[in-house]
Image (cartoon, rainbow, N blue to C red):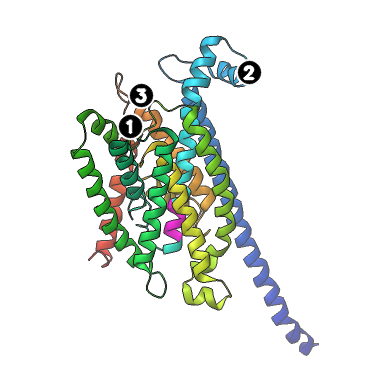
Amino acid sequence: MTGTLLRETPDARLADAVRAVARVRGRGRGRSVVAAAGLLVAVVAMFAVSLAVGDMVTPLGKVVETLAGGGDGGSRFVVLELRLPRALLAVLVGLGFGLSGAVFQSVLRNPLAAPDVIGISAGASAVAVTASLLFQVSGLALSGSALAGAVAAGAAIYLLAWRQGIAGQRLVLIGVGFGTGLSSVVWYVMARSDTADAQEAYLWLTGTLNGRSWGEVWPLLSCVAVLVPLTALAARALGPLQLGDDAAAGLGARVEPGRLALLGCATALAGVATAAAGPVGFVAFVAGPIARRLVPGRGAALPHAALTGALIVLVADFGAQHLLPTVQLPVGVVTSIIGAPYLLLLLARANRGGSGG
């Protein structure tokens, strides 16, 4: 009898351990679902407020009626032509930047590895400003040039950082230097251009949704509809990559192809978001950390980062429209007010921890 109990004890303990792990995972999944649902509700609520509030306040009931195809001519013009494209663009831009930043930070395992820090946005800005001011490119061609600049900058930084593989610290440092050089190109081109054109380019460089229409929404929506599933597909390699190259290779992961696919998707997401609204600062930088704090222990939390980015841009754009009664600020001004203190806090923490240099 005693021998039988002794033989059963290890199995019972193993079963208890398995049940305990399952409970912990279940709680983690439950928190993840609740956090995602909360973020989605917040995005929808802020989206509705953006459609209802303005120089002419439209009751939410009338907003819903207008979206359903009803409403009078004035409501349809204000809601469908003025506010809806801008609100949709805010959601898509925030989603693109938030998802891009979370991928960069997770793949490179560095909280500073956001596209607006490591030179991706600077590449888009340099090519777009040069095309606009020197060659009078506009419209979809200008958006395409911004996307091409982001992709070219990402490829150049990747190649410069390659040393039998990619180290996150090295890529970030090279990206910061590369971005600084591209910013010099931007300011040089602006200094040589007509004052009025340079002022318009400067407004775009701050990141703005002012005056945006359906013409900017459809191309961005098409790109996001393609890039988000591709990123989700590439993200299957993210778990092993976060363990380090050696551990990932030991688990059978294709390290370099997986990393290249993720970085390529993140670069394209940042590029299309920049093409639509300019380099809206700090959204990609703060969305990922906020999302990971909401769901600790859930890895990169990419869906949460995308929703967080959308919420940040919606709130920031609402503030940009209504903080000052007679002026509409560029949305990038408000996101910089949010993100700059976070960057200083992050650097201060790194310095206290002995890694600040």
The kind of residue on which mark 3 rests is: His
Q: Residue furthest left?
A: 191
* The furthest residue to the right: 1
Residue 6 placement: quadrant: bottom right
Q: Which residue is mark 3?
A: 322
Quarter the C terminus occupies: bottom left
User: In the figure, residue 319 lies in which quadrant?
Assistant: top left
Q: Amino acid at mark 2?
A: Gly
> Which numbered mark, 3 or 1, is in the foreground of this view?
1
Residue 195 visible (yes or no): yes
Q: Position of residue 347 (x, y in %)?
A: 27, 57
Disc number lying in front (3 or 2): 2
Q: Is residue 102 magenta?
A: yes
Residue type at mark 1?
Pro
| Image height of 5 relative to 273, above or below | below
Residue on which disc 1 sits? 330
Q: Residue furthest front?
A: 135
The mark found on residue 214 in the picture is none
Task: Specify the principal SS of the magenta part.
Answer: helix
For the magenta stretch, what is the residue range?
A: 101-106
**Could you tell me how far apart the alpha carbons at marks 3 and 2 are, in whole angstroms?**
28 Å
User: Callout 1: 10 Å neighbours few (<14), some, many (20+)?
Assistant: many
Find disc 2 in the rendering and name its residue: 69
Report if the CB atoms under discs 3 and 2 are less than 8 Å apart.
no
Numbered disc 2: secondary structure: loop
